[in-house]
Amino acid sequence: MRDPKVRLLGTLFLCVWVPLVLSVFDAVDFQRSLSTAVRFIGYPLAGIFIVQALSDDKARQVVFIGTAIVVGFWCLDAMIQWTLGYDVFGYPSQPGALTGVFYPKIRLGVVTAVFAPVLYEGVRRYGRRYPWSWLVLLAMVAAVILNGRRAGWMMLAIATVGYVAYLYFVAERRQWLRWMAVGGVAFAIAVGMVSQTQLVQDRMSRTLAVFQGDYEGINRATSLRLGIWRVGAEIARDHPVNGIGGRGYDAASEHYVQERGVDGMVSTHAHLFALEIAAETGLIGIAGYAVFLVVLVRGLLGVPRQAWPRVWPWGIGALVAGFPLNVNHAFYGSFWSAIFWWLVFVTIAMMPEQRAPARRAAVA
């Protein structure tokens, strides 16, 4: 534990894992909550391996370029699926959603969005040498929009704002303005290409229903999530300290709707990270989650300015993946946890090496 990176990794992990363990004792679904807490133990072990494996610049560069290429491929593959009806693996397009390599799951938008800062940084670094890389940027924006999940739209918007803010501090003013102009044009072209499709128009019509100001309009705009959130709020209120146990939302929501008569919907998770954490791990979980965010942001701000290009694109992705208002997958679920923790661990691994202070020798 002398390695500052391993200490940071351990601190961040404990902020999330300790509330999970404390929620197990009176969990509504003891077996599932226990298995969730046990499953999480594997993450810090993987994190230590990632930190050690990315201890030299060559390995870091390979991971950076490799990730940008893989995400870029996802996006280009999705464009092929949109154009031809099948992607390069033969996966067919689905009515109302672009799935790409994630077929049949509609995960393309939300997963691509959290890796968007890495792709942005790749285009920034290599755009002059490889001008065609700008086409990948257009494909990324179009793929996220055509995926049809507005959660992905929101996450891409947050990731983009975060990257623009980061770029403001690492680039010269003239260079920053040039990147904003070029990036703005690229975004406008991508949005213009897909905005007239029936899928996008339907999603926008549903989103604009929020301005009706009534329950039906807001519920339609949020894809019928108000009923899910009402049940989640009831659960959090009845179990304020340590919650109902990790991944216990499914069983608890069924009990609240069918047996207690709460006017809401049964769901596998709360479709809102902050509410899911409050319901499943209580105020202890919320406190740990808040400390996690503070520690991670402080760690990012403590990185020397010259190392920001190496660290911050990953850090922005990690913050977007753990954003409290995310409405996509379950925060404690295996799929999103794997993505979230991988981004956190790579962020830490990309930080500059720091030697732990040596202990002073005892004076005889």
Image (spheres, rainbow, N blue to C red):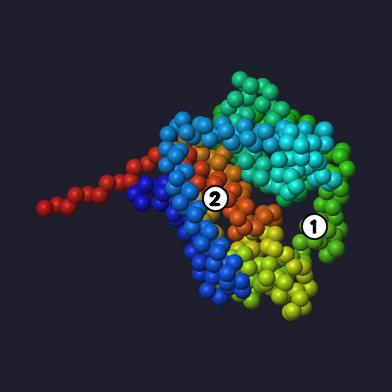
Position of 289 compared to 248: left or right? left
**Residue ranking furthest to the left:** 364
Q: Residue at x 49, y 64 (%)?
A: 18
Q: Residue at x 82, y 33 (%)?
A: 83
Front in this rendered view, residue 58 or 357: 58
Query: Mark 1 falls on what kind of element?
Result: loop
Residue 256 seen from this side: yes
Q: Position of residue 11 (x, y in %)?
A: 45, 55
Say few, some or many: other residues with alpha carbon within 10 Å of mark 1 (under 14 / 14 to 19 / 20 or more).
Answer: few
Say few, some or many: other residues with alpha carbon within 10 Å of mark 2 (under 14 / 14 to 19 / 20 or more).
Answer: many
- Asked which quadrant contains residue 30, the reply is bottom right
Three-letter amino acid code at the position of disc 1: Ser
Q: Which residue is mark 1?
A: 223
- Cα distance between the residues tagged 2 and 1: 28 Å
Q: Is residue 286 above or below residue 337?
A: below
Query: Mark 2 falls on what kind of element?
Result: helix
Q: Which residue is mark 2?
A: 341
Residue 142 seen from this side: no
